[in-house]
Amino acid sequence: EVQLVESGGGLVKPGGSLRLSCAASGFTFSSYSMNWVRQAPGKGLEWVSSISSSSSYIYYADSVKGRFTISRDNAKNSLYLQMNSLRAEDTAVYYCACSIAVAAAFDYWGQGTLVTVSS
Amino acid sequence: DIQLTQSPSFLSASVGDRVTITCRASQGISSYLAWYQQKPGKAPKLLIYAASTLQSGVPSRFSGSGSGTEFTLTISSLQPEDFATYYCQQLNSYLFTFGGGTKVEIK
């Protein structure tokens, strides 16, 4: 069974940093691109970042470029999101997601981890 | 960047109604469009991919159509469990944008 479990969320002050993790199981993690998607309270979904299977290709939304860094450790079946210079508008539930059984869609999602940026 | 505009943003409907949601892309995306359903406090669930392919396990009352810049999600007969928020997503470019969402509520 495919499982994606996010962790690392919490309360952080503006300007602070936080590192999110996503532990993957039930599939060959090293073969698939991975993604982060976020959702601010009461708002819609926002794609944040993607990383290819071997980390050769990395993409960011303009809203986080230069502040967030996506990475992965295929030996540990884990995806990460290092978030620096956090702002109030980064407050959201952060989901990791991937495309496994289908192409061009996110068919598996984690349960999400809440990041709150507030003083 | 490709923008996706969903309409309507809010829809009030009754059980048994036929419901149609539209997603328009700011430039052509071929058929690289997916639809998701999200219920409060839950992760999104994939309904449709490649514009019209039903995800395994999704009821056949859901269908998708379109290509290029205009897409639709149709629920042929709305069921109580379908009251949720629906999002489209484009995967034509590597900035995988989502539409703003359509909340379907009970009339």
Image: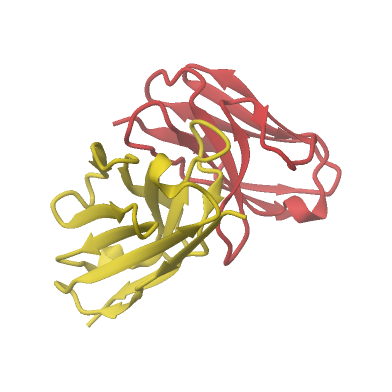
Chain colours: A yellow, B red
Q: How many marks?
A: 0
Q: Residue at x 41, y 18 (%)?
A: B28
Q: Residue furthest bottom?
A: A119
Tell which of A26 and A10 is nearer to you: A26
The residue located at (33%, 74%) in the rendering is A116
The picture quadrant where one finds residue B1 is: top left
In which quadrant of the rendered view does residue A59 lie? top left
Q: Position of residue B54 (x, y in %)?
A: 69, 32
Q: Judge from the rendering whether residue A79 lies leftward or rightward of residue B47; answer left or right.
A: left
Q: Position of residue A53 (x, y in %)?
A: 34, 41
On screen, residue B52 above or below A20? above
| Residue B37 percent coordinates (x, y) | 62, 48
Question: Is residue A48 among the parts visible in the rendering?
Answer: yes
The residue lying toward the viewer, choosing from A94 and B87, is: A94
Q: Is residue A32 visible?
A: no
Residue at 51% over, 37% down: A105
The location of residue B51, given as percent across then percent down, is 58, 26
Pick the front one: A36 or A99: A99
Image quadrant where one finds the C terminus of chain B: bottom right
Question: Furthest residue to the front?
Answer: A75
**A25 up-or-down from B32: above or below:** below
Is A70 placed above or below B78 here? Answer: below
Seen in the image, is A71 located left or right of residue A97? left
- Residue at 14% x, 66% y is A85
Q: Is residue B5 left or right of residue B41?
A: left
